[in-house]
Image (cartoon, helix red, strand yellow):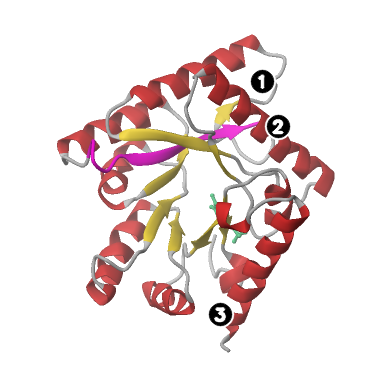
C-alpha cells in the first residue's frame, strides 16, 4: 500500500470509529479531501485510492484542476468538487462554473452574484449549487463567517443569520445545504467541542425557524479536530494534512 492509501484507510477508520462512538452511521459523513496547494496529479492518485470528494480554497486552483482531471477521467468520474474557501466577490464566476458544493457563503453579496451567474448558465433549477453558510461562533480564528458568537443570547445575531438563511434558501440557483464552521487553532479539545456543539444547535434552531423539510448539514472538522466534529454531528469533514501530509505553502 502507498503512503497515500494507508493514510486514507486510517482516516476512514477514524471516521468509522468516531461515528460508532456517537451512535452514528458513518455513511452520513462525507470525507472532503482537501487538495489545496497540491498539484492536480495528486488528485489522480487520490482518485485511484478511492477518494471522490475534493476540496479547494482558491478559485484559480479549482479552475485549473477540474478541467485537468476531467481531461484525464472524463466528465463522469463521480468526482464532487467542493469549494471551501472564503470567496471575494470578483471571484464568484469560476465558483459558479466549477464548484459542485460551496462551503463558505458568508455574505449576501456573494450569494447574489453566484445566483445570477448560475441562472445565467442555465444551471438552475436542475442542478442548483448546494451552499453552506459559514458562521463564526467562537470569535477567534478569523474574521470570516457570519457573526454568531453570542447567538444564544443575541436576538440581533439570530435575526441576522435567520434572514441570511431565508434569503439564500429563496435564491434561484442555490440551495441552503447547511452550516460550516472552523474551530480556533490550538484551543483545548473541550473548547473546540463546544464550538462544534454550538454550531449544531444553531443549525437545529435555524432549520426549525425556516421550517426546512430536511435537517441542515454540518461542515466542520479538519485534520486536528474531525473526530470531535463527528461526535457533534458533522456531516462533512474537510481533511487535508492527515491524507496528504504537510503543505509546502499556506
Ligand atoms: C485547509 C483547509 C482545511 C483542511 O485543513 P487540514 O488541517 O489540512 O486538514 C479545511 N477547511 C478549510 C476551510 C481549509 O482552508
Tell me the residue that label 1 is attached to: 151
Query: What is the CA distance from the residue labelled 2 to the residue labelled 3?
Result: 34 Å
Q: Choose between 10 and 244: the one closer to the eye.
A: 10
User: Residue sitting at 66 percent across and 44 percent down?
Assistant: 233
Q: Dot 3, how many residues are within 10 Å of its Cα: few (below 14), some (14-19), or many (20+)?
A: some
Identify the mark nearer the N-term, 1 or 2: 1
Q: Dot 1, how many residues are within 10 Å of its Cα: few (below 14), some (14-19), or many (20+)?
A: some
Residue 187 falls within the magenta-colored stretch: no
Identify the mark nearer the N-term, 1 or 3: 3
Q: Is residue 184 above or below residue 174?
A: below
Q: Choose between 116 and 172: the one closer to the eye.
A: 172
Q: Choose between 177 and 89: the one closer to the eye.
A: 177
Q: Which mark, by number, is residue 215?
A: none
The x, y position of residue 245, in whole percent, is 60, 73
User: Residue sitting at 29 percent across and 58 percent down?
Assistant: 63
Q: Which mark, by number, is residue 198?
A: 2
Question: Is residue 37 rendered to the left or right of residue 186?
Answer: left
Q: Is residue 85 above or below residue 115?
A: below
Which quadrant of the picture is home to ligand 1?
Answer: bottom right
Tell me the residue that label 3 is attached to: 4
Query: What is the CA distance from the residue labelled 1 to the residue labelled 2?
Result: 9 Å
Q: Which residues are magenta?
A: 124-138
User: Residue sitting at 54 percent across and 25 percent down?
Assistant: 207
Q: Is residue 45 above or below residue 24?
A: below
Identify the mark nearer the N-term, 2 or 3: 3
The x, y position of residue 185, in whole percent, is 71, 49
Amino acid at each position: 500500500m502507498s503512503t497515500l492509501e494507508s493514510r486514507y484507510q486510517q482516516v476512514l477508520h477514524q471516521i468509522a470509529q468516531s461515528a460508532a462512538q456517537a451512535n452514528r452511521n458513518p455513511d452520513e459523513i462525507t470525507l472532503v479531501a482537501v487538495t489545496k496547494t497540491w498539484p492536480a496529479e495528486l488528485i489522480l492518485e487520490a482518485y485511484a485510492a478511492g477518494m471522490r470528494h475534493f476540496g479547494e480554497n482558491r478559485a484559480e486552483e479549482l479552475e485549473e484542476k477540474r478541467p485537468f482531471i476531467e481531461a484525464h477521467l472524463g466528465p463522469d468520474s463521480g468526482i464532487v468538487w467542493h469549494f471551501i474557501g472564503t470567496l471575494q466577490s470578483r471571484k464568484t464566476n469560476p465558483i459558479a462554473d466549477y464548484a459542485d458544493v460551496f462551503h463558505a457563503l458568508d455574505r449576501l453579496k456573494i450569494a447574489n452574484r453566484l445566483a445570477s451567474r448560475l441562472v445565467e448558465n442555465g444551471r438552475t433549477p436542475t442542478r442548483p449549487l448546494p451552499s453552506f453558510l459559514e458562521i463564526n461562533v467562537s470569535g477567534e480564528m478569523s474574521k470570516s463567517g457570519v457573526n454568531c458568537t453570542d447567538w444564544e443570547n443575541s436576538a440581533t445575531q439570530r435575526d441576522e443569520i435567520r434572514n441570511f438563511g431565508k434569503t439564500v434558501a429563496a435564491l434561484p440557483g442555490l440551495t441552503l445545504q447547511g452550516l460550516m464552521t472552523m474551530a480556533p487553532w490550538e484551543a483545548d479539545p473541550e473548547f473546540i467541542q463546544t464550538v462544534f456543539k454550538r454550531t449544531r444547535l444553531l443549525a437545529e434552531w435555524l432549520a426549525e425557524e425556516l421550517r426546512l423539510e430536511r435537517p441542515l448539514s454540518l461542515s466542520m472538522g479538519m485534520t486536528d479536530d474531525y473526530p470531535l466534529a463527528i461526535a457533534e454531528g458533522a456531516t462533512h469533514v474537510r481533511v487535508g494534512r492527515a491524507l496528504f501530509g504537510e503543505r509546502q505553502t499556506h
